[in-house]
Amino acid sequence: MADDLLIRLADEIRASKKTIALTGAGISVESGIPDFRSAGGLWSRYDPEEYAHIDGFHRDPVKIWNMLREIIAVIRAAEPNPGHCALAELEEMGYLSSVITQNVDGLHQAAGSRRVIEFHGSNRYLICLRCGYRGETEAFDTDATVPRCPQCDAVLKPDVVFFGEPIPGDAMREAFEEARQADLVLVIGTSAVVFPASSIPSTARDRGARVVEINLEETPLTGRISDYIIQAPAGEALPQVVALLRERLGGEE
Ligand code: APR
């Protein structure tokens, strides 16, 4: 582990007036949820143009549910990992203002994070595109059947953002407001290739913020937008950063 970068990050979090985190599927991989673009990721088995575009859902929702069923089952079995818990601890300590997540698995909230901006919606609810019905996913047996609207019988859709759909207005506004005010952005477990989430770090940097990546591999941000990258699993790096921060704060008492 690059200890000097972990120490540097702990010191920068301690000195920061407002730190935010932007997370992607990588932070949930250690919870057993495959990411999208790593080897063996979801998009190596399902073509996102076919399975994750809203036009595909309108065309053949029953087919899309073959993928959705698999994701929902994996999410249902998943628990927060030390990476999620470290971010919740950082918020508790008063050193993290918000988590802007592209994930729809609810694991940040399950770990105890209170200020979570779900930029791509959430699997927690199913919605009806025809009549506006909205219900808890857990109320439907998505393993056995394709969930249908109890009001108009249309096939329901998870309340997540498909390609070709807009980002929820509140999430967009809140996320970019946080980015404009942040002086430190932790970019964790995202390939940073999907817009507009991928422009959150540069929005902060344009206003003088520092940007630090925690990822297994480099991304298009590396060396251009981010000041440095801690190349390690989030579930290992984040707890170490929090422990180093605690050590320093302990010295202040
Ligand atoms: N720790 C840190 N980073 C990790 C880990 C880990 N344990 N495991 C994987 N990663 C990194 C990968 O190296 C990759 O850079 O996480 C990133 C995951 O990238 P993607 O699979 O592209 O996921 P994400 O960036 O969240 O995708 C963005 O694309 O398909 C859409 O809507 C979907 O929200 C998703 C968006």
Image (cartoon, rainbow, N blue to C red):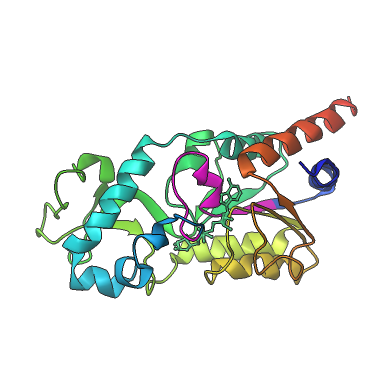
In percent of the image, x 37 and y 71: which residue is there? 165
Q: Which residues are magenta?
A: 20-37
Q: Is residue 22 magenta?
A: yes
- Residue 127 in view in this figure: no
Compared to 75, does 133 lie above or below? Answer: below
In percent of the image, x 9 and y 58: which residue is there? 153
Please state, as top left, top right, bottom left or bottom right, where the C terminus lies in the image.
Answer: top right
Q: Nearer the viewer, residue 79 or 160?
A: 79
State left or right for residue 77 relative to residue 81.
left
In percent of the image, x 62 and y 70: which residue is there? 199
Compared to 98, does 177 lie above or below? Answer: below
| Residue 61: percent from left, percent from top | 20, 64
In percent of the image, x 39 and y 71: which residue is there? 163
- Residue 80 in view in this figure: yes
| Residue 230: percent from left, percent from top | 74, 50
| Residue 190: percent from left, percent from top | 58, 58
Residue furthest to the front? 39
Q: Nearer the viewer, residue 174 or 129?
A: 129
Compared to 124, does 132 lie above or below? Answer: below
- Residue 227, by quadrant, is bottom right
| Residue 20: percent from left, percent from top | 67, 52
Please state, as top left, top right, bottom left or bottom right, where the N terminus lies in the image.
Answer: top right
Q: Is residue 50 magenta?
A: no
State left or right for residue 205 relative to residue 91.
right
State left or right for residue 112 relative to residue 13.
left
